[in-house]
Amino acid sequence: MKESIVATIVFADLMSSTEMAKNLTLQEYDEMIVNLQSTMYEVVSHHLSSYGYVGKGLDSYWSIAGDELRIFLYSGAVHFDVRNALLLSTKIKLAWLASGFNERVLEEGRLVSRIGAGINCGKVIKDAREWRARMGERQPNIEGYAINVTKRIESVSREGNVYQIMVGDSLYRRCQESNAINVAFSKPRSLVFKGLGQKIPVYELVSFVNFEILPSMPAFLQNDLLDKMEYAVSQPNPEPWIFITLLRHHASLIASGRHEYLESHAIELAQQALEVLEYKTVIYNMLGWFCAYGQRVRNLELALHYFDQSLSLEPGNEAALLHKARILDMMGQMDRARHTYEEILSQNQDHPEARRKVVQYRVGQG
Amino acid sequence: MLGEVFGNASYIDVALVLLIVFVLFSGIKVQRRVEQRIEEMEKKILALKKYEGDAFQSLDNRYVSLKKTLFDKTNELITKLQAILKSNKAVMSEIDNKTKPLKASLDDTMDKVEATKDSLRKTILENEKEMKNIRKELNDFSKEIQRMKDDIRERTIDLEL
């Protein structure tokens, strides 16, 4: 049955695969492709089943051909699909970084092979084709302009310098609509793609703070993953996005209350990330968070300083404002705390904590 | 002639003859005494045999009499026992008749009790299973709640960074 649906589309492939095919022997190239495909297969199949996708073309469809992965998510909940598309793209990159192939590359001190991705949302037609049924395949065909656009967006992923995950305007807008995903994008670049005949805004993912990335990896891929990430960031020219994923994971471990020993290391890592990342707001927020809520490194003055740094880069950053208000409250500076909470309310009238605190301050004054 | 004999015989011969005669007479006397003793002993033996016969006879008589007494007594006892048994049988039959409905009702009650016991056992077993399932479900639920709580905490951290 032919139906028009809104799908979140992910294209991912190996960067510079043509150059690699030229430089590697056929045997070596084949080994690399086998490694890449099995890594993609493990991550995608495990992720979709863990997050409740039925598959079989009902709410998702994906395929791997050569070094290219295509994923279509159309569960009916677009924001859910968007979050999963971002998670999948990051997880594939991480799994490939920790793969046997890249492990050898890292040991030899060469630059690791990277995966680039393009994500976008858009209307597509889902249709079960007769020829597919004759071939014994039950999956539907998914066609539409959005797919072509996503493929083009993915083709410029090598121009990125943080995540190398590029997104289209539709996906960017969906992320702005929802405040349930902590994600940041670069400024848009308007690109003209061959065959599309018009300028298309493309954004690069510059920050994706999500606790699920590491814990939702297939169990066998989780072995030594942290060590591999730590090793990767200790090498020259590390991929910047690894810092964000690693620091976010350290925040989880520290929040669990059993890994205080990580606090100093997390701060060192965050300071290192400040030198590598262009988008520093999230790193200042993380530094402030470690200083505000850590056990061994607790320093409210320093935490306040980091949140102020974050706010100097992004004055309306709600997370930084919230922590600043909390710290001021803890320090007994009620007027400044109330002022900061009111600043949050000026951007987000429904913020529950800010509303409650402002009322409390008013009652206290009265 | 005898005179001639004696007249020619010396004193020693006479003494010898006298001795022989004395021995002869003594032998006869001893033989007579032995015979007398044998006779007495035979008499005694006869008397003893007679006593023995009498004793056996008396024993036989006593045995027969005792046997008869015993037989009579046993017969009497058997008769009495039979009478008692007969009477008991009647009583038993009467009791049986009277308790038959009670027994039937008791049997019925016992059957019901057994059935109730079985059903109770089953119910308890089922309840145990059910309790086990409920416990497992509660455990899973509490784990799920904990996971959700962790998830909410982590999502909050995500959004506050």
Image (spheres, coloured by chain):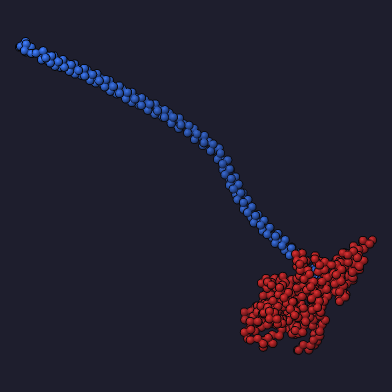
> The N terminus of chain B appears in which quarter of the rendering?
top left
> The C terminus of chain B appears in which quarter of the rendering?
bottom right
Relative side of A62 to B75, left or right: right
Rendered location of residue A83, percent (x, y)? 76, 74
What colour do you see for chain B? blue
Position of residue A342 relative to residue A237, above or below, is above
Rendered location of residue A183, percent (x, y)? 80, 75
- How many marks overall? 0
Rendered location of residue A288, percent (x, y)? 83, 70
- Residue sitting at x 62%, y 79%: A136
Name the one closer to the observer, B4 or B89. B4
Q: Image quadrant of residue A20?
A: bottom right
Name the one closer to the observer, A298 or A257. A298
Q: Residue furthest right?
A: A366
Position of residue A42 relative to residue A255, above or below, is below
Position of residue A197 relative to residue A2, above or below, is below
Rendered location of residue A213, percent (x, y)? 73, 72
- Residue sitting at x 81%, y 69%: A290
- Residue sitting at x 52%, y 36%: B92
The red one among the chains is: A
Position of residue B136 relative to residue A28, above or below, is above
Look at the image and tell me whether residue A184 can be seen: no
Name the one closer to the observer, A30 or B134. A30
- Residue sitting at x 50%, y 34%: B88
Relative side of A281 to B128, left or right: right
Look at the image and tell me whether residue B58 can be seen: yes
